[in-house]
């Protein structure tokens, strides 16, 4: 998989085919026009930014269900910093999405005048996930043209379904799969961290908590709005 991110532009394609919905569980809404808003907080619960996602298209391709989404990142004052393209797909009973979200959005916004490409895997969420199940790893790489010293990669591994729990945010109460994983960021220096994500069917990520290498909470994100 290889693609370019276009900063401050439209974005996200998701293909979907209703005839196969009974075989595939979407961990994201499926209706065109749906807008999701997530707020990001630091370890002291202070707002650090907001991500707004809009489903802008719904199409069919090669037996897959796919959606198209515009992903916009705003700073804590609501100023737009970046718009990027994301892709989600459901094929053969497995829901996948690309790993762009594991790149630091503030860092990407600061690189808007640089030319770079992103290569990586898609993370998988099987329709029949069970507590205790281990999920596949994934890696994403950011390659900066003419400045290889700024190249970086992020690997998400040790993914495990820990539990099924109810999570309540400003957007409502949702039954979620609690998934834990470790993160290795390979840049100028290696950074080890971990996270826990609560993800709901037909909704997506409801809450995500990030921890540093010492297991201390570094920040978290919550779903605050879901408009269809």
Image: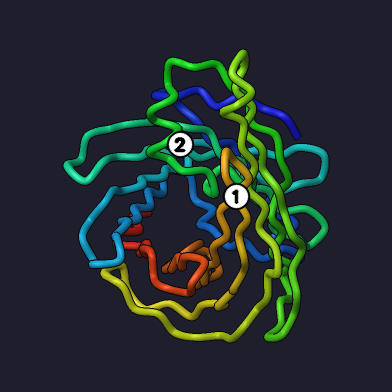
Where residue 58 sits in the image (x, y, percent)? Answer: 58, 40
| Residue placed most toward the observer, 102 or 14 | 102
Front-lying residue, 27 or 109: 109
Say left or right for 47 vs 96: left
User: Residue at coordinates 72% horizontally, 53% vertically from top-left?
Assistant: 138
Q: Which mark is residue 18?
A: none
List the single residue furthest toward the left: 77
User: Nearest the camera: 197 or 58?
Assistant: 197
Q: Residues within 10 Å of mark 2 (few under 14, many from 20)?
A: many
Residues under labels 1 and 2: Cα distance? 31 Å
Name the image colouring: rainbow
Which residue shows up at 76% across the image and 46% down it?
64
Residue 80, image x, y percentages: 28, 32
What's the residue at 37%, 54% (across, down)? 228
Counting from the top left corner in percent of width and height, residue 54 is at 42, 42
Report the front residue among 200 and 193.
Answer: 193
Under tag 2, what secondary structure? Answer: strand
Q: Residue at x 54, y 49 (%)?
A: 102
Counting residues from the start of the chain, the first of labels 1 and 2 encountered is: 2
Side of 110 where 74 appears, left or right: left
Instruction: Please tell me whether mark 1 or mark 2 is closer to you in this view.
Output: 1
Residue 70's label in the rendered image is 2
Disc number placed over residue 190 in the picture, else none: 1
The total of numbered circles placed on residues is 2
In the displayed structure image, the side of residue 74 where residue 15 appears, left or right: right
Q: Quadrant of the N terminus?
A: top right
């Amino acid at each position: 998989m290889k693609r370019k991110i276009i900063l401050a532009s439209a974005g996200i394609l998701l293909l979907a085919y209703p005839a196969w919905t009974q075989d595939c569980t979407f961990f994201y809404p499926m209706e065109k026009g749906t807008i999701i808003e997530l707020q990001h907080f630091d370890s002291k619960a202070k707002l650090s930014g907001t991500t707004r996602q809009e489903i802008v298209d719904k199409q069919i391709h090669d037996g897959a269900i796919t959606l198209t989404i515009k992903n916009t990142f705003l700073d804590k004052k609501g100023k737009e910093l970046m718009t990027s393209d994301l892709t989600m797909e459901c094929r053969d009973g497995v829901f996948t999405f690309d790993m762009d979200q594991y790149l630091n959005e503030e860092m990407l916004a600061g690189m808007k005048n640089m030319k770079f490409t992103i290569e990586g895997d898609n993370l998988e969420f099987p329709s029949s996930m069970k507590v205790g199940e281990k999920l596949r790893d994934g890696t994403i790489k950011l390659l900066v043209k003419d400045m290889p010293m700024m190249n970086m990669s992020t690997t998400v591994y040790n993914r495990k379904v820990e539990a099924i729990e109810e999570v309540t945010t400003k957007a409502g109460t949702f039954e979620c799969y609690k998934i834990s994983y470790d993160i290795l960021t390979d840049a100028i220096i290696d950074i080890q961290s971990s996270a826990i994500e609560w993800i709901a069917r037909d909704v997506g990520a409801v809450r995500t908590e990030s921890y540093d290498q010492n297991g201390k909470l570094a920040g978290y994100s919550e779903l605050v709005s879901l408009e269809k």
